[in-house]
Image (cartoon, helix red, strand yellow):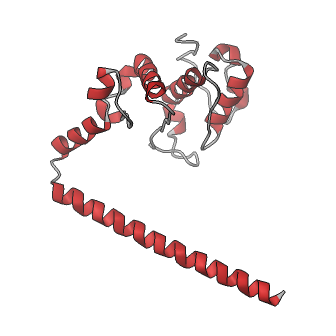
Amino acid sequence: MKDGISSSREFHPSKLEDWPSPDDLGLDSNQFKAFQAALTSEFVIIQGPPGTGKTFLGLRIAQVLLENSKLWKEPSLPGSGDGPILIVCYTNHALDQFLLGILGSHARQFEPSSLIRVGGRSKFEQLQTEYSLRSAISRMKKTDRVSSAKYRRGEFLARKAIESLKESRQKLVNELHALQNDLGKKQ
């Protein structure tokens, strides 16, 4: 048992009968409901006042995702894949605490290139030097040896695609308004 979660116990999120109990996970009933929602929904927000266990719960969710990654990366599951896990925190301190918790229990899984901290300055040297966005960009430039001209070209193409999508969206909005006006006139 590691921090309240058995690392040897795998369970599939869609099979509720296989789930560990709230006690096995060290969660109260409200935390357990949020835990289940996080593992069975595409998107979930966990919020609450200070001291209610948001970071603790987030670490449990991340730990289960990491320990069961072969299940959620299963190609036969809808919405599965090698996508990232995005953690958003309101403060730099909360983000640091969360990342240090993840690194403490799963450091072996995270090479600096596989975990990126985006945000203001961290008070922790390891997070600032190894896992910051600036460090990731620096590593990428060194390892990929991609010229700045290629970066600018990629950025230009991305902006052009975004502009095209905005124009298409506006055309659709205009067509929708025209249809609504036509319907209003017929009634």
Q: Is residue 123 above or below residue 184?
A: above
Q: Position of residue 121 (x, y in %)?
A: 34, 30
Compared with residue 78, is residue 155 higher up or lower down, i.e. above or below? below
Residue 158, x across and y down, in percent: 34, 63
Q: Would residue 26 appear left or right of 156 to someone viewing this image? A: right
Count up the numbered dots: 0
Q: Position of residue 110 (x, y in %)?
A: 35, 27
Quadrant where the C terminus sits is bottom right
| View extreme (right): residue | 187
Q: Residue at x 58, y 12 (%)?
A: 4
As displayed, is residue 49 above or below residue 132? above
In depth, the one of 147 and 72 nearer the eye is: 147
Q: In this view of the protein, which residue sits in the foreground, 75 or 153?
A: 153
View extreme (bottom): residue: 186
**Residue 169 coordinates in the image, percent (x, y):** 53, 72
Identify which residue, 187 or 100, lies in the foreground. Answer: 187
Residue 139's image quarter?
A: top left
Residue drawn at 64 percent across, 20 percent down: 52
From the image, which quarter does the N terminus lie in?
top right
Residue furthest to the top in view is 1
41 left or right of 58 in image: right
Q: Is residue 59 left or right of residue 113?
A: right
Please report the residue visible at 44 percent of the width from the left and 41 percent of the height from the top: 84
Q: Residue at x 74, y 21 (%)?
A: 29
